[in-house]
Image (cartoon, rainbow, N blue to C red):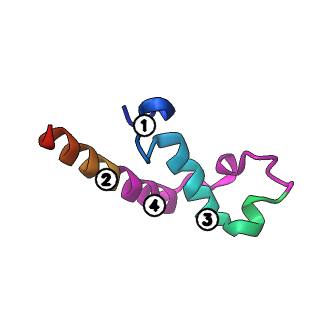
Amino acid sequence: YYYDHGNGNDCCYPADVDDYALHYFGEKGYHSSEFQDEAYLFVPFDETYYQGMKAYLERHYADFQKEENAS
């Protein structure tokens, strides 16, 4: 559900990973030719990354639960 781009929701895992990279590197760094449109691959995979992505996951999981409970 969360991974699928075509599910009609505002959030999905690939977009969230990419958005995290945008925030990590900033607009200029993210769009630089250094990363060739794959900036998310260059974000250090450490505790900071884990905590940052955890915030996305928890927020979107809570949104998912609200939608499911409203049905």
Q: Is residue 44 magenta?
A: yes
For the point 55% across and 57% down, the residue is 20
Whether residues under marks 4 and 3 lie with C-beta atoms below 8 angstroms apart, the answer is: yes
Q: Amino acid at mark 2?
A: Glu
Location of residue 67 in the rendering, given as x and y in whole percent from the top left corner = 22, 43
Q: Secondary structure at mark 1?
A: loop
- Provide the residue designation for mark 4: 52
For the point 63% across and 60% down, the residue is 22
What span is colored magenta in the figure? 33-58
Q: How dense is the environment of label 2, judged by Cα within 10 Å: few (below 14), some, or many (20 and up)? A: few
- Provide the residue designation for mark 1: 8
Nearer the camera: disc 4 or disc 1: 1
Q: CA distance from mark 4 to mark 1?
A: 24 Å
Q: Earlier in the sequence, mark 4 or mark 2?
A: 4
- In the rendered image, which quarter is residue 52 located in? bottom left
- Provide the residue designation for mark 2: 58
Q: Amino acid at mark 3?
A: Tyr
Q: Earlier in the sequence, mark 4 or mark 3?
A: 3
Nearer the camera: disc 1 or disc 3: 1
For the point 61% across and 57% down, the residue is 21
Question: Is residue 45 rendered to the left or right of residue 30?
Answer: left
Location of residue 8 in the rendering, given as x and y in whole percent from the top left corner = 42, 37
Q: Earlier in the sequence, mark 1 or mark 2?
A: 1
Q: CA distance from mark 2 to mark 3?
A: 19 Å
